Image (tube, rainbow, N blue to C red):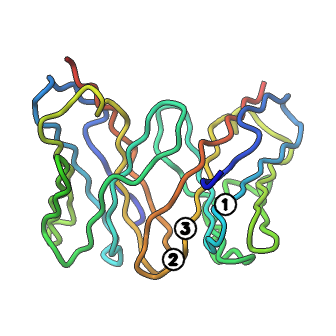
């Protein structure tokens, strides 16, 4: 019940294209769904997050789509840039504790 | 600095030795988390502190792993009798602990290599 499943494991996109990463969770008690971005040698950093009372959140080129009934959420990166090349982690958690369960990560490469 | 600080950044040890990893969270952050990231893997939750207490230790892999937090600030993760499978990057994160914040701020990690 604690798992968060993320796909794909790796993704190659041309500059200007759309990158899409998907996640699914099991625990219906989760009420917070963030995406973290990690560059090599650095710790993960929060990119964008959503709570289950909305179905979509957009910040610049990054959009989270959330489907509560399917227990799925996804990250869309519009107009992908080489600087977006990084590892992306979805996560799910409870705002009571702040504890997050992370997906396995997606390594994104954006080709110039 | 203003971020989460971890030390050492790199640690190479021999199998069977004990190691201590240190985390200095952002000043004023009441919640502190330890995660483990193995090569090509996701972030595995280890333990969570609220203040000096650890309400959730469910992720500690074995009794060789322990952690403490003193003064509501610095935390130490100790691995006794290290094994090769303990090799990983150990990440610490802190948050303000507010019910609606959610954001974890991560350090750059301590890379542990057990020979």
Mark 3 → mark 1, Cα distance in angstroms? 8 Å
Q: What is the secondary structure assignment of the residue under circle 1?
A: loop
Badge 2 density bin: few <14, some 14–19, many ≥20, Cα 10 Å: some
Q: Position of residue B102 (x, y in %)?
A: 43, 70
Q: Secondary structure at mark 3?
A: strand
**Which residue: 69% across, 74% down?**
B54
The residue where tag 1 is placed is B25
Q: Residues within 10 Å of mark 3 (few under 14, many from 20)?
A: many
Seen at 18% across and 42% down, the residue is A77
Specify which label sits upstream in the sequence, 3 or 1.
1
Picture layout, residue B107 above or below residue B29:
above
Q: Nearer the viewer, residue B103 or A96?
A: B103
Q: Which residue is mark 3?
A: B95
Q: Are marks 3 and 2 in contact (CB under 8 Å)?
A: no
- What is the CA distance from the residue labelled 2 to the residue labelled 1? 17 Å
Q: Residue at x 74, y 68 (%)?
A: B73
Q: Which residue is mark 2?
A: A97
Front residue (pair A27, A67):
A67
Element assignment for label 2: loop
């Amino acid at each position: 019940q604690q798992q968060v499943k993320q796909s794909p494991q790796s993704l190659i996109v041309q500059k200007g294209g759309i990158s899409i990463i998907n996640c699914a969770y099991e625990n219906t008690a989760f009420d917070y769904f963030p995406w973290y971005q990690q560059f090599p040698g650095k710790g993960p950093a929060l990119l964008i997050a959503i709570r289950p009372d909305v179905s979509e959140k957009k910040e610049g080129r990054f959009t989270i789509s959330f489907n509560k009934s399917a227990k799925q959420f996804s990250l869309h990166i519009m107009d992908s840039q080489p600087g977006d090349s990084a590892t992306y982690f979805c996560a799910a958690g409870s705002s009571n504790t702040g504890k997050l369960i992370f997906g396995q990560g997606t390594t994104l490469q954006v080709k110039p | 600095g203003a971020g989460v600080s971890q030390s050492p950044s790199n640690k190479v040890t021999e199998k069977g030795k004990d190691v201590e990893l240190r985390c200095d969270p952002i000043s004023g952050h009441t919640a502190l988390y330890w995660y483990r990231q193995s090569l090509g893997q996701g972030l595995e939750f280890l333990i969570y502190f609220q203040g000096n207490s650890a309400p959730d230790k469910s992720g500690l892999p074995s009794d060789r792993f322990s952690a403490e937090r003193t003064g509501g600030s610095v935390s130490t993760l100790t691995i006794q009798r290290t094994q090769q499978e303990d090799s990983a990057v150990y990440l610490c994160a802190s948050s303000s602990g507010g019910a609606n914040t959610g954001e974890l701020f991560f350090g750059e990690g301590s890379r542990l290599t057990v020979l």
